[in-house]
Image (tube, grey):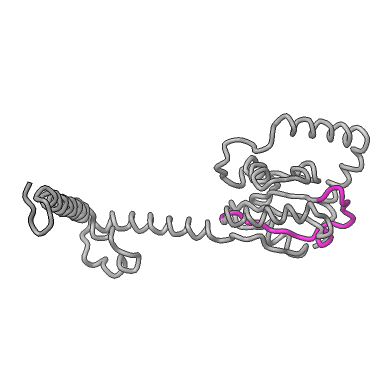
Amino acid sequence: MKIRNGMIYSEILEFYLRKMSHKMKLKKWFYVYKKKQRAMKPYERMTLKELNEAEDDFDEDDMKALEMYRQQRLQEWKILQKRQKYGELREISGEQYVKEVTNAQKDVWVVIHLYRSSIPMCLLVNQHLSLLARKFPEVKFVKAIVNSCIQNYHDRCLPTIFVYRNGQIKGRFIGVTECGGTNLKLEELEWKVAQIGAIKTDLEESPKQNITDMMISSIRSASIHGNNSASRDSDETNCYLNRNF
């Protein structure tokens, strides 16, 4: 086997073959790229500003296609803006309740948490809602100190979470048990809100065991509705009738 400049001929041949293969791949990629570019209409490579400036250069067919394309791009931009509109858990007062929640923008989901900072479970829910607000920026997440919204609201009904859409309450979680318990996990709260329809979760099933939920729900239902239903009904009525706006 011959050696030239310290390299075996077979190694030199392999080196040139690799180099040629690389060049061929580049040529193939460039050919495909140019082919795609030729197939694209000129307006498909333009920004909205460039589209407006180039209208005079298009014929009638191009103008029709251009208008459809412009509307598509505009719709995509609006959807993106809507999705990025919120993204944080904001504090509101009772005076802002109607404007920010009941009369929120059409078709926007609103999740509001009524809380007291002296209740640990409320602080946990606020922490989870802050993370959900970042994950689902198209949904409005707000919180309000309960005293500014409802007078004489019992601590045992906190945390209270209402989910609104178009001025209507679509779901609610009242009290520690309905909100998920003192060991509430972020995924569990995400699942609860998703079941109402406010968010589109990637969770495939409830993170919490269904059997546990059913047992707790049965015990709580028997206790509250059997012994204290009148008091509970009064508390829930306060949520709607005694707001301090």
Location of residue 62 by image quarter: bottom left
**Residue 18 percent location from the top left of the image:** 16, 50
73 and 146: which one is in front? 146
Q: Is residue 218 above or below residue 157?
A: above
Number of marks drawn: 0
Q: Is residue 195 above or below residue 109?
A: above
**Residue 138 percent location from the top left of the image:** 56, 55
Location of residue 196 by image quarter: top right
**Residue 22 percent location from the top left of the image:** 18, 53
Q: Kindly tell me whether residue 39 is visible in this rendering.
A: no
Determine whether, in the image, residue 43 is placed left or right of residue 93.
left
**Residue 83 percent location from the top left of the image:** 52, 56
Residue at screen point 9% across, 59% down: 5
Q: Is residue 55 magenta?
A: no
Please identify the quadrant where the C terminus is shown: bottom right
Identify the magenta region: 138-158
Determine whether, in the image, residue 189 is placed left or right of residue 63.
right
